[in-house]
Amino acid sequence: MAHNGNNGRFANNNDKPKNFKKSIAKLLRYSKKYLPMVIVALVITTLAVVIRVYSPTKLQELSNAIVDGFNRLSQTGMWFLDMKVITNICVVILVLCVLNFIFNFVQGLIMANVTQKVTKNLRRDISVKINKLPLKYIDGTATGDILSRVTNDVDLIGQSLNNSIVTIVSSVFLFFGTLIMMFIKNWLMAITAILATILGFVIMILVMKNSQKYFVKQQKNMGELNGFIEEVYSGHKIIKAYNAESESKAKFNVINKRLYNSGWKSQFYSGLIGPLMGFIGNLGFVAVCVVGAILYANGRVDFGAITAFMIYINLFSNSLSQMAQVTSSVQSAAASSERIFEFLDEDELSDESSKKNSLNPSDVLGNVTFRNVRFGYVDNKTIIKNFSVDIKAGQKVAIVGPTGAGKTTIVNILMRFYELNQPRLILGGRLTEYKVFDNGKSILLDTNSKGYLIVNNEETDFLVPDNYLELFKNGAIKFDQDFKIYTNKVLQPCGIPVITGNEIDTPNNYDFAIAYYGDIFIDGKPINSLTRNNIHDMFSMVLQDTWLFEGTVKDNIVYSKKSVSDEEVINACQYCGIDHFIKTLPNGYNTVLSDQTNISAGQKQLLTIARAMIQNSPMLILDEATSSVDTRTEQLIQKSMDNLTKNRTSFVIAHRLSTIKNADQIIVVKDGDIVECGNHAELLAKDGFYSNLYNSQFQEI
Amino acid sequence: MFRLFKNLTKKDLTMIFASVILIIVQVWLDLKLPGYMKQITENLVTTGGAKTIILNYGIKMLACALSVALLAIIVGFLIAKVSASFGTVLRTKVFDKVQGFSLAEINKFSTASLITRSTNDIIQVQNTVAMGLQVLIRAPIMAIWAIVEIVNKSWQWSIATSVAVMVILLLISIVTIFAIPRFKVIQKQTDDLNRVTRENILGTRVIRAYNAEEYEENRFEGVNGKLTNTHLFVSRIMALLSPGMNLVMSGLTLAIYWIGVIIINNAGLIQKAGLFSDMMAYSQYATRVIMAFIMLALIFIILPRAIVSANRINEVLSTSETIKNGAGVNGKTKCGEIEFINVSFKYPDAEEYIIKDVSFKAKMGETIAFIGSTGSGKSTLINLIPRFYDTSEGQILIDGEDIKNYTLEQIHNIVGYISQNAILFSGTIESNLSVGANDKKQYSVEELDNVTKISQCYDFIKSKKEEYKSEVTQGGSNLSGGQKQRLSIARALLRNPEILIFDDSFSALDYKTDYSLRQSLKEKCGGVTKIFVAQRVGTIKDADNIIVLDNGCVVGSGKHDWLLDNCEVYKEIVLSQLSEEEIK
């Protein structure tokens, strides 16, 4: 399927925009910076239109000058042409032609520049946006969908920007300009020309309206046929092995026949445009000729006017068809613009520039504490209900459970790919007045409300993060009982019994209650108080889906790390046992990895391990790094992973018994929630889910 | 391209011939228009215009214009029919051809490429025929005829026209030489842009974990900048095209008038009026000549793309099938015995053998299993049985007959093959189960119930509202991996084969289902020879004979317990999956 994920399939660019005006307005606001250039282009275009509308007049003069010669000849029998006047007119026309060319060309250059700048910015902004979006969005959106915005939608906008803005203005000017000029020259001929042209367009519109259904049908049949071909070719083996060729051929023929029927019809209709346009041209031409000639014969119009009208009628029908074209092009641009800005306006990750807290990765010990952690991907569906564990620096943590149980959830929240449900501190108690502090904001409540909900269950020790300590210290809350506040460095039960559920009444015996959704702590610091970048600096990660990009082997290993020497890279690779392989590649460490490079899944995995090694972070996350390779390669990878995990706090999503058995902590996950936690012996003794899993021939299923 | 035209039917050719005739008439009528105009002009300047004559010519002109339009519509109709029929025939031929391909041919092209060839490439050729045929016939006729009309009128005009034609050709050449190759570059750079973006999206977790957002943005800016520059280059050149053509067209008209005036001025009194009307007509003819050349040039810009597509289609059509159908074996008794005699296999152009000298024999009802690490050749080996590939050396016998003697249809009826990735088609569960029902058009509910019970999918089918009529979406995406595998097993059972081949088709089943499925296979399909390929030791532990493959060679065969003690590779595989104490 990966091969077939052509962009085309995702491109629903012909959709009508939901809000046409808004989308176009957004696009224009986005391109504001280039407005001066656009205005210059428009002014130039206007000049060009003026020239186009004016030059037939010159042609008229030229024709008249010649015809005058004939008139003189027939009246006086003498031939005389004022060649000087004629040469002058010709020179003027030539100059006008050249000017028109220059104006149009310059306008084209300016708009090409503007278009390319705008599209480049759009592409860049989309790309930058990807890295600012929460994973929730990215995991929930088809890759092809984002891709088609970067390419198809931006391209479409590019095309219509290039033509439309200018064409809208020029075609309108041309339309009115021609109209005015025609009426100035001769109203009767003008009406003739307009009627002829409009008659032609009415016929054309009727035909095209009628043809729309065939285009839709053809598109549908084509999609159907492509889908069928894709399905049959992908299932070729089965079709063969089950002697189903005649079956699929029969079905193919039916769809193919349908495509033939709608295909030739839509081809026929779209082929009508040419002859019809030609006919419109000819119709106008003949009408103007005849009417003009009669008027000329009656002496009501000069000969040159007929010549001029020949051109005007052309310009007039051109302006009409341009307007028609531009409307459809602007329509699709609006749809694309809507899709792009919809993406650019998605909510981004929270801004963390105000966070001052940070840990220096080189000083981090690697103590990780999960304290009363609650989490759910969807707001009202909590899957990790209340999980606490202390992981000491250097320990190995195995995360196990059946496929689809949500083992990666732990990685997701630890790395803050997904945010924990908002930590919330609610303080209550029988004080002189009741105060509720929610995320630091105090809300005054009336004295009749008695107490506040206590959400934590089972756990009796609460943790007050640094930033809330102030509230206690500055006396915003007074206690009439001996009540200790603990900093997060030393965790001690603070002695408040727990009421389960969201009970509103505080029992009489208690004056004070705290409800707090838990957090994860690294060396005692809640991860929420650290920036995401800071957290990521402390972890190296190797994932099940090896991720390499098209670039050299070295680039892939060094990646974003600054100032890494070649020696370090080679050392890391030797350590992972991949150095020899890299040296057999055509350009060694400078070989560009691409789809064509002959490199196995195992070797790819070793490269990502080398990358993690170069990163040299104090903590590690290994997500089933060996599931896609065979047993022997697995042993090789396992060895280098063991090297990597030495002295590092590591989280290993694992299915190998050896890894799991000697882990310091095993976190057992089932249906998203963490059901058990402890070391191998403890868990076996518990005789719970883990021991069940283990005894039923432990393996990935 | 032209080789493909052999696929045009007699009817198509007749229609094309008719089109040529009609187009000639059309051009003739079209070129009459300036002639009539000339008459009107002459009439105007000499006699000052006689209404009847003007109206007379006017009606003639209108009739001409109408006929031209009508003829064009008829030609459009014919060409639309021809091109659509051409595309339809090509599609059928390519589709039928691909249906006949063995896996060797499929792999040579890759499935994705074959899909493109059968869809986009054919559309491309079809569209070019539709657009091109008209222009290709019409433009030269128009150009030649129009030139003939004007050629002896005045050498000065002819020179002006030739210069204009040359300038136009030059302009188009510039665009062709500089811009067209860049379109390919743009295509490639767009692919790069797509690739980097795709990498960015797929690698989001890694990128964030390594704080490499900026690195990725720089990488994107690299390809983005390149793409933008190429676009800019191309659109600058393209900006020249339309104003340039306009300049040439109006320049030519001006030149004809200018020259005309001078000629008229210098001509004798009697010729003057004739020359003037000639001039009017000439400018019309010249415009048509130029348009014809522009059209032709555009065709030559479009044509290369179509030729590339045509060649790709030809490649498919001219590929011969490597697997030859056998003559057929009659009067064979059904028993399901299979034997490999010194079978080796390598891909046609490869040097290394994938399978080397494999021999074994399975009797009726036995279970044979193949195990080995990835790349050990076990899947390839069983792909030889339904003749997806043919052996390079050695022989495979089914019931004592070389499989090459059977017809492919016979082989496929004897062998029930279940693929590694369960392949389902859009339709219903029933339509999927009865794929390739052969002579039998419909299966009874009892038959369906029977096989779905064996393959452990009875319950989940019955739990669906429409049971066997439940919808299956393309690729079976609305079913889980395990459900798909069980359905594809049921599909094979339904055909009541002598030999069942499971190509790692238990991989998505959980341990319990795996077990019950094997149990019911044993009970209900005792007489069927079963061949397993598996990764999981649990699946094959009970087989009558386990054959261990390593790098295409048999390194051990026997029962589970015996192999554990005697085969190092087997032991390694088992150890990696089970802990020591569980093996015993």
Image (cartoon, rainbow, N blue to C red):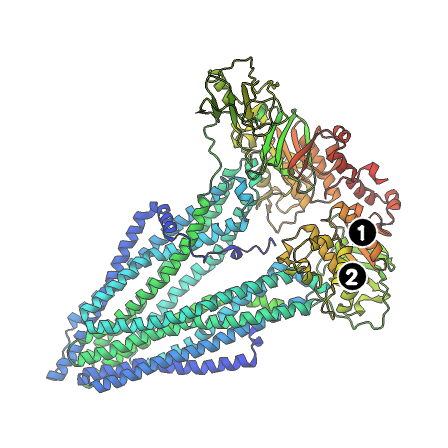
| Mark-to-mark CA distance, 1 and 2 | 22 Å
Q: Is residue A246 left or right of residue B271?
A: right
Label 1: few (<14), some or many (≥20) within 10 Å?
A: some
**What label sits on residue B453 in the rendered view?**
none
Q: Nearer the viewer, mark 1 or mark 2?
A: 1
Residue B558 image offset from top left, x and y in percent: 87, 50
Residue A102 or residue A113, whichever sits in front: A113
Q: SS of the residue at dot 1?
A: helix
Residue A540 image offset from top left, x and y in percent: 61, 33
Residue B445 or residue A698, whichever sits in front: B445
The type of residue carrying mark 2 is: Ile
- Can residue A94 be seen here? The reply is no
Residue A78 image offset from top left, x and y in percent: 12, 82
Label 2: few (<14), some or many (≥20) within 10 Å?
A: many
In the rendered image, which quarter is residue A463 located in? top right
Residue occupied by mark 2: B385
Q: Which badge, 1 or 2, is on the more N-terminal residue?
A: 2
Q: Chain of mark 1?
A: B
Quarter placement of the N terminus of chain B: bottom right
Residue A311 image offset from top left, x and y in percent: 26, 70
Residue occupied by mark 1: B518
- Can residue A381 be seen here? The reply is yes
The type of residue carrying mark 1 is: Arg
Q: Is residue A425 left or right of residue A460?
A: left
Please tell me whether residue B141 is drawn above or below residue B504 in the rendered image. below
Task: Give the residue at x 86% y 64%.
Answer: B335
The answer to whether the residue labelled 1 contacts the one labelled 2, judged by CB atoms less than 8 Å apart, is no
Q: Are marks 1 and 2 on the same chain?
A: yes
Q: Chain of mark 2?
A: B
Quarter placement of the C terminus of chain B: top right
